[in-house]
C-alpha cells in the first residue's frame, strides 16, 4: 500500500505488517499515524524531510527505536 501524498523516496514498507499479531498491528498503526502527522506538519510548514529521516522513521515504524529517538530532530534548536 503506497501513501499517495508522499514522494516515492518516502514510501514505507507495509509488507511486514501482515505478519504481526493484532496488538503489534495496533502499535504499528499508532506509530504510523505519528509519522504521518510529523511529515504533514513539516509539509504544512514548508519543510522538506531532512536526509536520513526516512531511515530513522522506518526504524521507528518497525519498533527498533523509541519515539524520543525517532523525533529527536524536532527538538533540536
Image: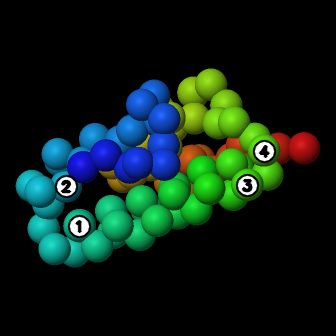
Element type at marker 3?
helix
Q: Residue at x 57, y 27 (%)?
A: 52
User: How far is the residue under mark 2 from the one under mark 3?
Assistant: 28 Å
Query: Which residue in the structure is indicated by mark 3?
Result: 44
User: How far is the residue under mark 2 from the one under mark 1?
Assistant: 6 Å
Q: Which mark is residue 64?
A: none
Query: Which residue in the structure is indicated by mark 1?
Result: 25
Does the residue at mark 2 contact the one at mark 1 (Cβ under 8 Å)? Answer: yes
Element type at marker 4?
loop
Query: Which residue in the structure is indicated by mark 2?
Result: 17
Indicate the position of residue 7 as horizontal and vertical percent values: 48, 35
User: How far is the residue under mark 4 from the one under mark 2?
Assistant: 31 Å
Q: Which mark is residue 46?
A: 4
Q: In this view of the protein, can residue 24 be seen by the observer? A: yes
Who comes first in sequence, dot 2 or dot 3? Answer: 2
Element type at marker 2?
helix
Indicate the position of residue 18 as horizontal and vertical percent values: 12, 57
User: How far is the residue under mark 1 from the one under mark 3?
Assistant: 28 Å
Who comes first in sequence, dot 4 or dot 2? Answer: 2
Who comes first in sequence, dot 1 or dot 3? Answer: 1
* Image position of 64 with respect to 18: above or below: above
Amino acid at each position: 500500500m503506497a501513501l499517495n501524498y508522499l514522494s516515492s523516496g518516502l514510501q514505507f514498507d507495509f509488507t511486514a505488517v501482515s505478519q504481526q499479531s493484532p496488538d503489534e498491528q495496533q502499535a504499528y498503526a499508532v506509530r504510523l499515524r505519528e509519522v504521518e502527522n510529523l511529515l504533514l506538519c513539516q509539509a504544512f510548514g514548508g519543510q522538506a524531510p531532512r536526509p536520513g529521516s526516512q531511515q530513522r522513521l522506518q526504524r521507528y515504524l518497525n519498533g527498533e527505536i523509541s519515539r524520543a529517538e525517532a523525533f529527536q530532530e524536532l527538538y533540536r534548536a
